[in-house]
Each structure stands twice: as C-alpha cells, then as structure tokens.
C-alpha cells in the first residue's frame, strides 16, 4: 500500500476527470442521479483537494469561496473501499489548514444528515434546521477557524 497523499488540483487539470468520476460513483449514482445533468460551473472556481493512493484519486473535497471570511466545503467523496480509513479526516484537516492560511475565518458546509456525526466530531456545529438537497436530508454546519 502506498502512503496516502493530499494534493490540490483544479477543474482544468488532467486529474479532474478522476474527481468527476469519484463524485459520480459515490455521490450521484446511489441517488439515481448523474453529474451529467447538473451545472458544474462552480467547479471552475473551486480549489479541489484530492486524496491519492499512488496516482489513484480515492477522495476529494471541493472548496468554494463565499466571501472574504467564509469558504464552503462541498462535494466531499471517498470511494467506499477507503471509507473508515481516515481519508475524509485527512482531506478536512488539510483543507481547513489551507483555508486558515488563506485568511478565511469560517467554513460552511451542507452535510448529509446521515454523516453529520463525522463533521460534529471535527468540531462543526449545526446551524438551523434540516433541509432537503438532492432529494435527501441535509444540515447546514459551520466551524470557526483558528
């Protein structure tokens, strides 16, 4: 097994196709949906964190600028075979450090309700009530960065 590495990429990079495929497999196909039917315009503006096993992308997290103090984490996905192996935690911690170094003070995200405990364990707080996004229950969660 290769050591897991975290890297930053962008929608214009050759790695983006692997990120797209990961999001499609983990986030959309289980819901009977496809990224092919969605606008991906935001992707061009995002910093994309990838977790890699050698050259293979096994996890991703999109970072989207909201304003001068807040960044939104979105579309986090880890292949099923890699879930439960701290890949998500590595992505989140790396992205939080990056955001703090860029001057952001707060992270905002829409967490699927079924995995909100993961974010709570990382210090995120639920703001407001449950809402529906892509046909499933979500929670708005936020965290202040040091």
Image: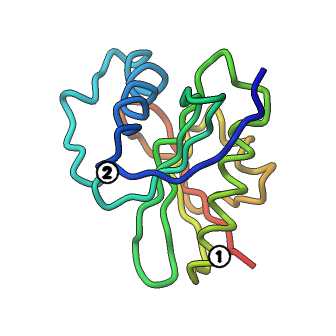
Q: Looking at the image, which residue is at 75% across and 51% down?
A: 120
Residue 127: quarter of image: bottom right
- The quarter in which the N terminus is drawn is top right
Q: Which secondary structure lies at badge 2?
A: helix
Residue 77: quarter of image: top right
Foreground residue among 22 and 118: 22
Q: Looking at the image, which residue is at 66% across and 64% down?
A: 96
Q: Looking at the image, which residue is at 41% across and 40% down?
A: 132
Q: Is residue 82 left or right of residue 77?
A: right
Residue matched to label 1: 100
Residue matched to label 2: 43
**Residue 62 placed where, x, y %?**
47, 51
**Neighbour class for label 1 at 10 Å: few (<14), some, many (≥20)?**
some
Q: Is residue 5 left or right of residue 121?
A: left
Q: Looking at the image, which residue is at 59% across and 70% down?
A: 99
**Residue 78 placed where, x, y %?**
59, 30
**Residue 104 placed where, x, y %?**
57, 79
**Residue 69 placed where, x, y %?**
51, 82
- The quarter in which the C terminus is drawn is bottom right
Foreground residue among 58 and 62: 58
Residue 117 higher or lower than 146, as above or below: above
């Amino acid at each position: 097994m290769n050591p897991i590495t975290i890297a930053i990429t962008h929608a214009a990079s050759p790695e983006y196709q692997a990120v797209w495929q990961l999001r499609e497999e983990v986030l959309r196909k289980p819901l009977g949906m496809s990224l092919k039917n969605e606008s991906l315009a935001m992707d061009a503006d995002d910093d994309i964190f990838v977790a890699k096993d050698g050259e293979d992308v096994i996890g991703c997290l999109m970072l989207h600028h909201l304003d001068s103090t807040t960044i939104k984490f979105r579309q986090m996905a880890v292949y099923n075979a890699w879930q439960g192996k701290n890949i998500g935690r590595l992505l989140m911690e790396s992205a939080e450090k990056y955001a703090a170094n860029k001057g952001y003070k707060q992270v905002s995200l829409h967490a699927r309700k079924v995995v909100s405990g993961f974010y709570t364990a990382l210090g995120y707080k639920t703001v407001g009530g449950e809402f529906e996004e892509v046909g499933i229950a979500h929670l708005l969660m936020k965290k202040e960065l040091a």
